[in-house]
Image (cartoon, rainbow, N blue to C red):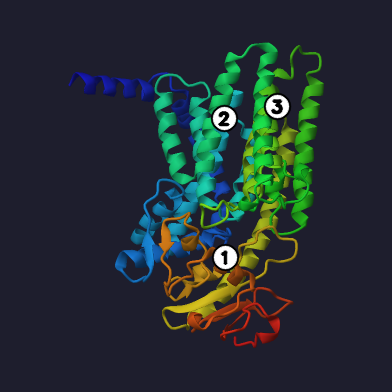
Amino acid sequence: MGPLQDIRETWARFLNEDNLTLAFLRRKRWAILAVSVVVLIPCFWHRRIEAGDLASHVYNAWLAQLIERGQAPGLYLAKQWNNILFDVTLLRLVNVVGFAVAQKIVVSACVLIFFWGIFAFIAAVTERPPWFLTPCIAMLAYGYSFSMGFMNYYLSLGLACFALALLWRARGMDWVGGGMFALLTILAHPIGFLWLVGTLAYIKLRAKLPGWRKLTLPSVAAAVFFAVYWYTAHRPALSADWDRGPFYLYNGADQLVLYGKRYIALAAAAFLLGVICVGADLYGRRHERGCWRPFELPFELYAVTFCATALLPENLHPPMFGGWIGLLSSRLTTISAILGLCVLGHLKPRKWHLAGFGACTAVFYAFLYQDTGWMNRLEANAEKLVSGLAPGTRVIATLDSPAGSRILFIHHSVERACVGHCFSYANYEPASGEFRVRVREGSPVVTSSTEVAEDMASGEYEVDETDLPLKQIYQCDASDLTKLCIRDLKAGETNGAPESKPSTR
């Protein structure tokens, strides 16, 4: 009983003696609860949570159920150790409470992990709770990475933030807690884990370097990212591209640009407000010696991340992978935004900071409510179309996002509508080899080629005789893109040809 008693005593000290985190949770529990309720409002203001690829995760959870029952010919569940945490959690909960409730619970948990993970990370960096930045974190929680539905990646960043918060000034049991969060991070997504390990190594090495030698770290990091840029640009086999617009626009504020051009003005206003806050703070401290020093490390980390997003490709297709590594830099700016908030966390809080960021958040939430409401109407129409289909009917959805929208995966809403009714033949996840649900060639449930899946979704696929019977769901009213129609496809035609789309509502 000796070792067991030692373990018990260690945990008792961790939980009861000089634990600032638990003391903070006890003291601020009602504030934490109130903020959590407000942050979760977008998860409940519509019947469905609209977040791009989330609908595909839900659909593939249904396929996983069918695989376990032996009802999905040609599909199987692969064993893998990353990019699975969200999907496994969703599937297990779906088996208990059903799809509708499980989505609300799991997505809400992810949002809270992301929000409070960032809050804890900023608090660790600045050594004080960043209450005045909660509006900014609330916006980021529903930013580009969330709205695109990169749920495993999104979850990994929240978990990585908790790990960094524990390990920033780690002592004793902090390493155990940080290690547990690191394990969960890698189960969620490798990018979150790489960011965690890279950031931790960076700050520990930097702490050991004296004076000007600290500058070697950002220089080496920039050189590494440039080497990656040069290598990928000179390897045609990787199919790398940097097709994302001017690099300087991807500064973290771009996470607020979602469904249309009006978000651009909001993102610019939020970024400008942050710059003004920092400038005003430094001006107010201009007579204080070394007033800029608290900002040095978080700004340095932000600059290194900005360099990464500028030099790393947006998309690449390594030959060893079935699918693309896509929208890499666009999603990495979530990390830029987190580190930018760490810079702002060193400000002396002012009421006008909270008022300004709060106003931005109110406008952002208003825009988001309207646009996700539009998505809900589209998905409701998809549900009406597929509800009368014979079980097992194969469909392809070719849907276009509204002009100016960065959220491209709206066709996945048809996949979620298909749960229990039909098979999305263009479902990209099984063919990509990057997720648990995989496909063997010849499956009647889904195509086994990522190239074919992409052509189907973009309306550039020539229908083969072996694909039939096959139906297409498409937008049939240019004045209202939420209105959908369905038709039978014929061998030899291109599924996206507008002239061959008779309406059958």
Q: Is residue 73 visible?
A: yes
Q: Give the residue type that dot 1 points to.
A: Glu
Specify few, some or many for label 1: CA neighbours under 10 Å numbering under 14, 14-19, or 20 or more: some
Quadrant for the C terminus, please.
Answer: bottom right
Q: Position of residue 424 (x, y in %)?
A: 50, 72
Q: Is residue 135 visible?
A: no
> Mark 2 falls on what kind of element?
helix
Q: Give the residue type that dot 2 points to.
A: Thr
Q: Give the residue type that dot 3 points to.
A: Leu
Which residue is the site of mark 1?
Answer: 451
Looking at the rendered structure, which numbered label has been put on residue 199?
2
Specify few, some or many for label 2: CA neighbours under 10 Å numbering under 14, 14-19, or 20 or more: some
Q: Position of residue 413 (x, y in %)?
A: 56, 67
Position of 339 with respect to 352 (left or right) is left
Position of 73 with respect to 311 (left or right) is left
How far is disc 2 from disc 3 in space, using C-alphas? 22 Å
Q: Position of residue 386 (x, y in %)?
A: 50, 79
Ranked by sequence position, the earlier of labels 2 and 1 is 2
Q: Position of residue 369 (x, y in %)?
A: 65, 59
Numbered disc in front, either 2 or 3: 2
Which residue is the site of mark 3?
Answer: 347
Looking at the rendered structure, which numbered label has been put on residue 23?
none
Give yes or no for contact between labels 2 and 1 (Cβ–Cβ under 8 Å).
no
Is residue 207 depicted above or below 55 in this figure?
above
Numbered disc in front, either 1 or 3: 1
> Number of callouts in the render?
3
Is residue 188 depicted above or below 348 in this figure?
below
Give yes or no for contact between labels 1 and 3 (Cβ–Cβ under 8 Å).
no
